[in-house]
Amino acid sequence: DAGVIQSPRHEVTEMGQEVTLRCKPISGHNSLFWYRQTMMRGLELLIYFNNNVPIDDSGMPEDRFSAKMPNASFSTLKIQPSEPRDSAVYFCASSQGLWGQTQYFGPGTRLTVL
Amino acid sequence: AQSVTQLDSQVPVFEEAPVELRCNYSSSVSVYLFWYVQYPNQGLQLLLKYLSGSTLVKGINGFEAEFNKSQTSFHLRKPSVHISDTAEYFCAVSANSGNTPLVFGKGTRLSVIA
């Protein structure tokens, strides 16, 4: 099993640029989660999908953030325009069902916005 | 809503000594409880979880945790730690019904000293 795949692993960009993070969940999992991890705020849930439908995006910090899941095997998190305070590690996780089910995390994307 | 408090941000311990990482939660309803581990530059992975039944839960790598409803705690223990246990440990909680997300604590950094 390949596990959850995220790309890129590292992204360095300049303020104002568009950033797109990608995630491929584990095959057969129907729930997908995007998290952000920083030293100051810890691990924050940004948005989650169930059966490709966004269920709760209340954790998305601003309108600059958007996420899509066009099919069961792919999701994107986009930041436009990016700002230095967006610098963080972004994790994607998937599970077979929602709460109570084990979430499997990807390796993360380390984003640095200069 | 649920919340989690990990009482210690850092725990240093000598190799082969026992360790306990503390976790307290707050919830007005019954909960699911989890412990995840994050090794450097990796995503989180599940150590163990409590859904129902026996309050003593055994996980991977020799870890165990005990659910104490009266004290709203879910402390993680290991009788003898190894250098390889050095990592960040996260406690997480969700309500056991409804569409409530997993809430993570701020994490405890376990440092095992040779």
Image (cartoon, rainbow, N blue to C red):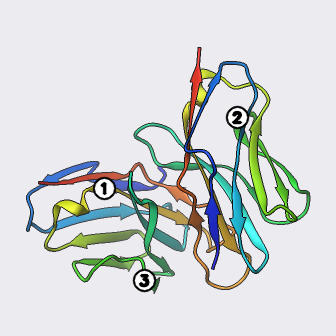
Residue A22 lies in what quarter of the image?
Answer: bottom left
Chain of the residue on which disc 2 is drawn: B
Give the residue type at disc 2. Asn
Helix or strand or loop: what does disc 2 sit on?
Answer: helix
Which mark, by number, is residue A88? 1
Q: Distance between the residues labelled 3 and 2?
A: 35 Å
- Which residue is nearer to you in this view: B22 or A51? B22
Q: Mark 3 or mark 2: which is in front?
A: 3
Residue at (11% x, 54% y) in the render: A114
Q: How far apart are marks 3 and 1 (CA)?
A: 19 Å
Residue at (39% x, 54% y) in the render: A5
| Residue situated furthest right in the rendering | B54
Q: Where is residue B85 in the image (x, y as percent from the top left)?
A: 61, 30
Q: Are marks 1 and 2 in contact (CB under 8 Å)?
A: no
Q: Where is residue B83 in the image (x, y as percent from the top left)?
A: 59, 22
| Residue situated furthest top in the rendering | B114
Helix or strand or loop: what does disc 3 sit on?
Answer: loop
Mark 3 crowd level (few <14, some 14–19, many ≥20, 10 Å Cα): few
Pointer 2 residue: B61
Pointer 3 residue: A58
**Left or right for B110, reference A40:** right
